[in-house]
Amino acid sequence: MSLKEVSMLPWVEKYRPKSLDEVVGQEEVVSSLKNILHTKAVPHMLFAGPPGVGKTATAHAFARDLFGPNYIDDGYFLEINASDERGIQTIREKVKMFARQIPMGEYSFKILFLDESDQLTDDAQHAFRRVMEQFSVTCRFILAANYSNRIIEPIQSRCAVFRFKPLGKVHVIQYLKWISDNEGLEADDQAYEVIYDFSEGDMRKAINILQACASISRRIEEKTVYEVMGYVSRGEVRRILELALSGKFTDARDDVRRLLYVQGIMPSDLVSAIYRELFYIDLDEEDKLELLDLLGEVDYRISEGATPEVQLMAFLARLAAKKRA
Amino acid sequence: MTELWVEKYRPKRVAEVVGNRESVEAFTKWMKQWELGRLLEKKAVLLYGPAGVGKTSLVLAYGKEHGYDVVEVNASDWRDEARMKAIVGESSLQATLDGSTKKIILVDEVDGIAGREDAGGIAALNRIITEARVPIVLVANNPWDPKLASIREKCLMLEFRRLKKAEMMKRLKEIAEAEGIKVSDAVLEKLVERSEGDLRSAINDFQAITGGRKIVEEHALEALGSRNRVREIFDALRMIFNVKSIRAARAALEGLEVDLDIVYTWILDNTPEQIPDPMDLVDALEALAKADLILARVNKKQEWRLIRYAIPIMTGGVAIARRHKPSGFVKFSFPSRIRLLQSTSAERELRKSIAQKIAAKLHLSTSKALSQMLPYISFMVSNDSGMGEAIARFFEFTESELNYLRGGKAEEAQAHRRAGRRRRKG
């Protein structure tokens, strides 16, 4: 790959922190991890926090600081995403393959990083707990999760739990400015503010927005950001709610199905997006309250295993029966 | 569910289409005229006739054989002109200017538009036929509604008749051979008789009585009773949506040899059309949602006895919610969910392969790659700043993946232009 191409990598990858020193906005976590590095007594760890605040990046940075820059090629570090490998059987196989051999060299253990571990079912978590025990001599586990309360107690109690904070505006904008300098972009303060608002403190999203802006112009203004976001978000959820509210139930239903089955959006993300839009929709406050109550029920039923599409249809039918305020 | 034979054995070439040779040849001839760029007397074609005799199959087979994308539009997509234009208008005007695949627009259930007093729909369809630059094929069971007169005038009318017994026998035997199933002519003859010239239902019946076995004997026919499988579902639906008690609604499923999941989907997808009143619909869908929850618990906890609550709730709940009926008869239709999944399988495959490539490079799950990265990457590769190409190389996207990612942008640009035109007009 030529130098020019390297500079073109997706920036979320290119500007991923290479060491703990480069991780932003997580001072407490970083200082504890540095202590661990110093003593070299690595416990099992659970990284909990919202998306895009640096959990995965920190795990990689930690491993690199500990094992050196070839931490992956040297066989010290393996990453598994629980959301893609829900079956405990595949995880067990992969862990076994990885942890069975004691590493050659300075360190007597490896690190296995299990991302999105809250996507594992309870049963799978219990099975995983046994795997953790079985291999704990040769393998330390780092688990990442959005919500630590979705991780069963027995796993939590075996882990040092690190809480990752949502990133503040200052941190996000500072990082974006640093990237802009590196890439030779000009962006005004207003643009950074708007990017931050859209990102909701999610650094991955913020960097993606910045790069998408840079793909149309080296000079980034507020309206550049709006152009990108107009394309990216496309207001699909808003449109679905509007269709339902206009009594076009089957149209709304078809769009929900497209989002779920064709675009592959996660049901929980769809419910969250509806939740966010609900406050701004053209309805009486009483009606909004009723729909919030129902959405809570929908959310809960989905977590119990009900079919997201069906539950959301019941919600849309209720919305379709409402009159605009 | 195993693959439906009616899909698996759909003809892949025009020559494989069973029966109705005259209309098949007339259609082929008409398409050839299109391809030669001749000015045609009739700008669209209307295939009409009873269900299951190969109207849609012919169009799909032609498309496959001659490299067309067949864009299917269903009657349920026709409620308003804006939507119809968005679907048919754009596809038909795009033509092959951008060098993309050739398209045939296939409009299903045209008689459905007339039934729904959708005057705007008919007018818009008329305009689109006039302006179209791609072949438009309409399909109907009964094209003789007076409201369709203006459309009939513009169309080459091709009739499809019930299939002959010998033709159907031949096809069923081919399927039996391909599936490695031993079955006597007597059994196949019964299937053919029962189907009254409807090959689709005969194939459906055949698959139903086979039930995965390799040898099918005559007594297997008893499972069908006196009707065919799909008709049984229709009968059950007719009961569910017309009785007044939970007990009677529950009875609709008795003796029905169809998976509960499938019956559920049929009820669910017919509910909005059968229950026009919004408040009734709220109650019906809440009942269906509750039944879904119970079925989820059954699956999760293996509490089979709970099924007895799901059945009366999903049938009776819908029955008693239907306090108001639609004005006029609304026919039951094949579940749109299944249709959606069938018609989007290529797109879903493509998205999955894109997501896997992104996930592998960026330490993400495929679902996060889809929701959090794909829209931005799609934007970046759509702009020709050099960045797009490098990113495409980085992820090792294939040509068709790249086209798909860029397609979103093109679609949006079109939407902008459309909105612009409307604003200028208004």
Image (cartoon, coloured by chain):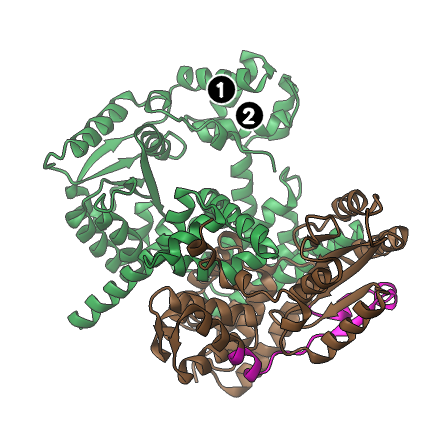
What chain is the green one? B
User: Which sits in the foreground, B207 or B276?
Assistant: B207
Residue linked to disc 1? B172
- Report in which chain the residue with disc 1 lies: B
Residue A284 seen: yes
Q: Quadrant of residue B287?
A: bottom right
Residue B332 seen: no
The amino acid type of the residue labelled 1 equals Leu
Identify the residue shown where x is 24% and y is 23%: B25
Q: Quadrant of the N terminus of chain B?
A: top right
* Left or right placement of residue A143 versus residue B79 in this view: right
User: Which sits in the foreground, B261 or A68?
Assistant: A68
User: Which sits in the foreground, B291 or A137?
Assistant: A137
* Left or right placement of residue B88 versus residue B206 in this view: left
Q: Position of residue B257 (x, y in %)?
A: 64, 37
The amino acid type of the residue labelled 2 equals Phe
**Is label 1 on the same chain as label 2?**
yes
Under circle 2, the secondary element is helix
- Report in which chain the residue with disc 2 lies: B
Q: Position of residue A165 (x, y in %)?
A: 67, 78
Under circle 1, the secondary element is helix
Going from N to C along the chain, the mark reached first, 1 or 2, is 1
- Where residue B206 is drawn, which disc sits there? 2
Q: Colour of chain A?
A: brown
Identify the residue shown where x is 84% and y is 66%: A159
**The furthest residue to the bottom:** A285
Q: Position of residue B417 (x, y in %)?
A: 24, 64
Which range of residues does the magenta coloring cover? A146-174
Does A166 lie within the magenta span? Answer: yes
Q: Position of residue B229 (x, y in %)?
A: 55, 35
Identify the residue shown where x is 35% and y is 31%: B64
Callout 1–callout 2 Cβ contact below 8 Å: yes
